[in-house]
Amino acid sequence: MAAESSTNAGECLQGNSGEVLEFTLEKEDYALDITIVREIVEMMPITVIPRAPAHIRGVINLRGEIVNIVNLNTFLNLPDRPITRDQKIIVLMAEVAGGNNVGIIVDTVSSVTEVSESQVDCMTERLAGNESRYIKGIINPGQETREGESRSLIIWLDIHKMFKDIERN
């Protein structure tokens, strides 16, 4: 199984290396392509939109722009939970969501990391299955923490696929 996923590492990486933004959600490490990130902002009041789809948490006013806040937990099949002041909003480039301003809520943002092809095992729909279709690949950082423990694997999300599915519905 690992051999099959490693052979298509270039497909999800788009070259020999790339940069990802690492963040946490529900105590797990995730990443997304840095090229789709517009900015990271502190949590602010979210206005709930009545009768909005389950994946829309609400909207925020970011310096005069209305930004739709997408509930990432819906797509990852994670339990919904209350928003806290410590969380962050990752605002994505408008072209990711068909020209709409969108942001996602995450628990913490840790770093921008360069990953190489050898660190990534890409997921295919055949391997990932329906529930994991928004996972682009698994990143093995291959580094140790300051305490000498191995770093956990990072789930690399395919945000483009997520928004294509939103547009279809």
Image (tube, rainbow, N blue to C red):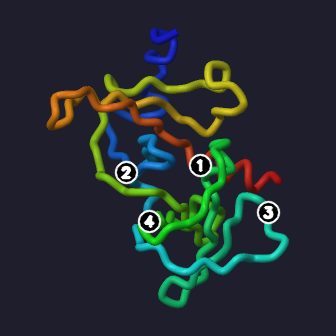
Task: Select label 4 or label 2 by which is in front.
Answer: 4
Q: Secondary structure at mark 1?
A: helix
Residue assigned mark 2: 21
Which residue is painted at 43% across and 49% down in the image?
24
Disc 2: CA contacts within 10 A as few (<14), some (14-19) or many (>=20): many
Type of the residue with mark 1: His
Cβ atoms under marks 3 and 4 closer than 8 Å: no
Task: Locate residue 149: give its quadrant.
Answer: top left
Q: Does 33 sit above or below residue 56?
A: above
Which residue is painted at 48% across and 66% down in the image?
89
Type of the residue with mark 3: Pro
Q: Secondary structure at mark 4?
A: strand
Label 4 to label 2: alpha-carbon separation: 13 Å
Residue assigned mark 1: 160
Disc 1: CA contacts within 10 A as few (<14), some (14-19) or many (>=20): some
Residue assigned mark 3: 53
Q: Does 52 sit above or below residue 161?
A: below
